[in-house]
Image (cartoon, rainbow, N blue to C red):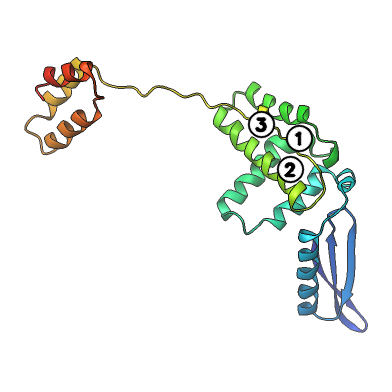
Amino acid sequence: MAIRKINNKYGASYQVRIRGADGRYITKVVQSRSEAETYETTLLNQRNHSVLPTQSGNRITMDEYFVLWFEAVKFQASLGWRKQQEKMYANHIKPVIGQIKLGKVSASLIALILNRMANRGLSPAARLHIYGLLRKLFSDANELFGLLSTSPVIKQLRPKLIIKEASYLNLDQLKRLLSYASGKPYELAIGLGVYLGVTSGRDSSFALAGCGL
């Protein structure tokens, strides 16, 4: 999408050029900048809200679709998150499916993207962010642009986060902590933290008694 100023012997004019959701360009030359901006906005609205044939996804590459999508959803996220989305796409998605037609992207290719990240040592949380971006991209291709009838980003591919049990102090460590805090301005805060942090049950009663609480 672009507005280009054209200088000729008759004066200046402005060319509006925007790629439609089917991958084809729409071009028009108008006489003023304001007219060009108005026409550009109209084209964007028509493109973003029209229902298009599902086979249109086979006319546009993933890279071309990302440019279209990134512009269309620019008000749906903060500037910082949009920069992060652009970086994630460039680093992890583009190398695998950037030149593939949108309608040809399969679940196996989505799995390949996530597996490559795992093989490079990226954490499940990082892979989950990429999965979320892919899910958004293909969901919008279906629901917003009408380019696809189904999404290849299936739930079975969602990376699972590893849940780690929180570390805690044992009885001896609790005693040492309370002893260290004794007489200090934060003694009460430490004592309350220990008391409230111990879970209910016979073991916790023993711990409280052992700490003098």
User: Would residue 122 appear left or right of 47 to someone viewing this image?
Assistant: left
Task: Report x, y in % for residue 111.
Answer: 72, 27
Task: Report x, y in % for residue 130.
Answer: 64, 36
Total numbered labels: 3
Mark 2, secondary structure of its residue: helix
- The C terminus appears in which quarter of the rendering? top left
**Residue placed furthest toward the right:** 9
Say few, some or many: other residues with alpha carbon within 10 Å of mark 3 (under 14 / 14 to 19 / 20 or more): few
Nearer to us in this view, 160 or 7: 160
Q: Are marks 1 and 2 in contact (CB under 8 Å)?
A: yes
Number of the label disc, if any, that sits on residue 155: 3
At 69% across and 41% down in the image, what residue appears? 89
Task: Report x, y in % for residue 177.
Answer: 17, 24
Say few, some or many: other residues with alpha carbon within 10 Å of mark 2 (under 14 / 14 to 19 / 20 or more): many
Residue 168 vertical position relative to residue 40 in the rendered view, above or below = above
Q: Gap in Å between the C-alphas at discs 3 and 2?
A: 13 Å
At 50% across and 24% down in the image, what residue appears? 162
Q: Gap in Å between the C-alphas at discs 1 and 2?
A: 7 Å
User: Would residue 38 appear left or right of 20 to someone viewing this image?
Assistant: left
- Three-letter amino acid code at the position of disc 2: Phe
At 15% across and 22% down in the image, what residue appears? 208
- Three-letter amino acid code at the position of disc 1: Pro
Number of the label disc, if any, that sits on residue 138: 2
Residue 21, picture quadrant = bottom right
Residue 75, picture quadrant = bottom right
Say few, some or many: other residues with alpha carbon within 10 Å of mark 1 (under 14 / 14 to 19 / 20 or more): many
User: Would residue 189 appear left or right of 18 to someone viewing this image?
Assistant: left
Q: Nearer the viewer, mark 3 or mark 2?
A: 3
At 66% across and 31% down in the image, what residue appears? 155
User: Would residue 213 appear left or right of 62 to someone viewing this image?
Assistant: left
Would you name the residue on which mark 1 appears?
152
